[in-house]
Amino acid sequence: MAGKKHAEAAASTEARFPYTNKPGSLRKLLKEIPTKPKPSKFDRTLLQSWGFRDANDHSMVRVLKAVNLLSGSNEPTAAYLQFMNLDGGPRVLGTEIKRLYAPLFTASHKPYEETPEKLKNLFNIHSGGGERALEYQMQTFKALCESASFDGQPTPAGAVTSAGAAAGTPGVSGAALSAATGQPTVNINLHIHLPENKTRRDYSDIIEDIGRYIFGRVSGDRRE
């Protein structure tokens, strides 16, 4: 009974969340964005050139605006550029989704993992619009979440973790060192090709030498 009342109340109000009536196209578009050059502006001509030729595909633009990937004039934003990054892009989108759908994330820690029945209940309570509009809002939310990550905040440009610490500065992350010195960070990616026919001790010595001479780490039981 309560659920029916919520549904009736929702139907009498405007849709609270943006939606596209082509959620399948939105899924495809979000996967296409990192593979395409940054456009100067999103319009029907661009969408058609990317293969989105249905007249309803343009409804995706309002969704991209709502998650801050496009500006009011349909131009790519700084968040769009971050989203193009294959490493941190999904987290950027995740942050925007949590902002836009704040009521859902207040009601549920992980609304994107809720059952269809529970998710529909959340939209009945926190959104608005008729039955079809509610369904499109849910499907749009699900399509956005499939290209997002919610495991943390976006990594600021230039930041690195302690695993990418600057050479010769043990125990200090590259980001911390850069902030302290004002110098650019240096990330080291090692690809080690170990020789064949060596003993386990020989391999241990090689690893210890890497730690000593590159990262400045000294083993207390180093065998000389």
Image: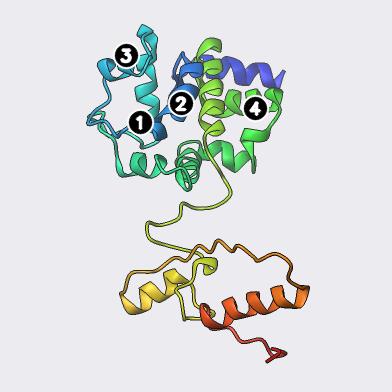
Q: Are marks 1 and 2 in contact (CB under 8 Å)?
A: no
First in sequence: mark 3 vs mark 1: 1
Q: How is the image coloured?
A: rainbow
Q: Residue at x 71, y 27 (%)?
A: 115
Look at the numbered disc 4 and give the secondary structure of its residue.
helix
Looking at the rendered structure, the kind of residue marked 3 is Gln
Mark on residue 48? 3
Tell me the quarter of the picture where residue 29 sits: top left
Mark on residue 119? 4
Query: Mark 2 and mark 4: span between their CA atoms?
Result: 15 Å
Query: Mark 1 and mark 2: span between their CA atoms?
Result: 31 Å
Mark on residue 16? 2
Q: As displayed, is residue 146 above or below residue 209? A: above
Q: Residue at x 56, y 16 (%)?
A: 135
Mark on residue 77? none
Between label 4 and label 1, give the one nearer the viewer: 1
Q: Residue at x 50, y 62 (%)?
A: 189
Between label 3 and label 1, give the one nearer the viewer: 1
Q: Which residue has dot 1 on it? A: 36
Look at the numbered disc 3 and give the secondary structure of its residue.
helix
Query: Mark 4 and mark 1: span between their CA atoms?
Result: 33 Å
Query: Mark 3 and mark 4: span between their CA atoms?
Result: 33 Å
First in sequence: mark 1 vs mark 2: 2
Q: Are marks 4 and 1 in contact (CB under 8 Å)?
A: no
Tell me the quarter of the picture where residue 121 sits: top right
Query: Mark 3 and mark 1: span between their CA atoms?
Result: 14 Å
